[in-house]
Amino acid sequence: MARPGLAKIFKQLTFWGDALALSLALWGAYFLRFSGWPIPVFHDVPSIHWYLQAWPVVLVVVCLSFQYGGLYLPRRNVSGVDEFSRLAQATTAAFLIVLTITFFYRTESYSRVVVFYSWALTIISASLVRAGLRRIEAHLRRKGVGTARLLLAGLTPTTRLIAENIRRFPDLGYEIVGVISEQEKPGAEWEGMQILGNLEQLSEVLERERVDDVILALPATEHHRLEAVLMNVNTAKVSMKIASDLFGIITNPLQTDEIYGIPLFAIKESPLSHSWARVLKRALDLVFTLPALVLLSPLLLALALAVKWTSRGPVLYCQERVGRDNQTFTIFKFRTMRMDAEKNTGPVWATKDDPRRTPIGTFLRKSSLDELPQLFNVVAGNMSLVGPRPERPHFVDQFQKTIPRYLDRHLVKAGLTGWAQVHGLRGNTPVEERVKFDLWYVENWSLWLDVKILIRTALEVFHHTDAY
């Protein structure tokens, strides 16, 4: 935690970038307001001197709001959409405070329009600055600059999942040095990682391997040893995180309670179990889908003609899938495979360089454009824009026998896109991993979460590597 200086450098750059963005926003708001467009000016233009005097106060208020909102915390896996949301909330809180201050400050009357313009321009300019810095930082991390040396503890499915995600997303900036465990001898290998020792040797391993971060993903049988482990580690030099082995079993937020000082955690009810939530979700589907069908109709027509001209057979591929409450429905897709694709094999998943694809099928599947006809499924009400991707009954019968809580993903409508998909888990990726993300979505749903997933889907549509 102490050695990599990249995070500290970018924290400082982010602060000064915010200050620059705010300054440009204030100047821009002043000139935009008093230029007479789009709102005419019917009085004398006030001196910019009064607004320059207010600049330090606004800067302090905004930066404190950003600090309180966690916008300067080092986070390695924050999407641009998440950061924009937090930045907009922090900026709104800051400018509400500024408005309150101007209400009580009567020496000079500040334009409320200037404050509004400043608010909007600050969100836009600070978001652009942060997006640029985030891209630069991610690029440097992919090149190995400023990466943190990470030690994993415990040979568990959670450990395996963490390692797989770190390898899949190098811009997280982690270099896995190895694993410690009681189950294997030092020098052995597990999932491509070297066993460096056991829990009792943790401090020695941290020093020898110059570790920055530790993630403890111990099996439940070793939880009683956590206290001794944490007591003997200098957490001033090493960042310690604990991964719950209940991930995938308990995924929704926990409410806190107590019985005479004994802390308790209560599992919340899923938001989508309420009828009002389902009504809101359905309204969001229609608000987005109906205009999308109108706007995308030329593209849908062009893709339909391309499918028809490049291969024999129907344009649409209709298939039975399982949706909410385990009810089956017919899903629509642009056909990307030959008509006899499963004649000799039965139901199978597509693979990389699948020979059954049509000439245009590879492009359609990789870009997810083959899924666009499912907008009609959304209008019909048997699918939602966002939700777990629907599977065929053949695979559902298999998975429910081997994957815990698999059928819980059917508590909501199947989706055109989902929480798993925007995290890169689509196509030929582990089903167990996707199910965990699906369950998290079911139990943590909100209207904003759906909007965020839709935005991320639109931004990432051409960046899939696992879509075959």
Image: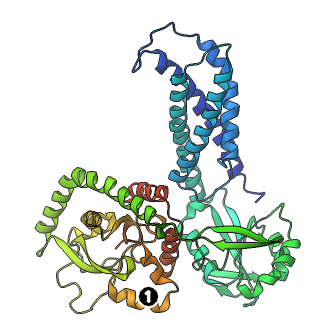
* Other residues around mark 1 within 10 Å, as few (<14) / some (14–19) / many (≥20): some
Residue shown at 60% from the left, 57% from the top: 141
Q: How many discs appear? A: 1
Name of the residue lying farthest toward the top: 44
Res 13 visible: no
The scheme the figure's colours follow is rainbow
Residue type, label 1: Phe
Q: Quadrant of residue 107?
A: top right
Q: Position of residue 120 (x, y in %)?
A: 51, 34
Tell me the quadrant of the picture where the C terminus can be found. Answer: bottom left
Residue shown at 78% from the left, 57% from the top: 2
Residue 216 horizontal side relative to residue 275, left or right:
right
Query: Quick one: 225 or 138, which is closer to the camera?
Result: 225
Q: Is residue 141 above or below residue 115?
A: below
Q: Quadrant of residue 35?
A: top left
Q: Which residue is mark 1?
A: 399
Residue shown at 33% from the left, 53% from the top: 287
Query: Quick one: 230 or 325, which is closer to the camera?
Result: 325
Q: Position of residue 418 (x, y in %)?
A: 43, 66
Q: Position of residue 114 (x, y in %)?
A: 53, 23
Q: Position of residue 169 (x, y in %)?
A: 54, 65
Q: Is residue 433 above or below residue 374?
A: below
Q: Is residue 397 above or below residue 390?
A: below
Res 115 visible: yes
Residue shown at 53% from the left, 42% from the top: 127
Q: Quadrant of residue 347?
A: bottom left
- Secondary-structure class at tag 1: helix
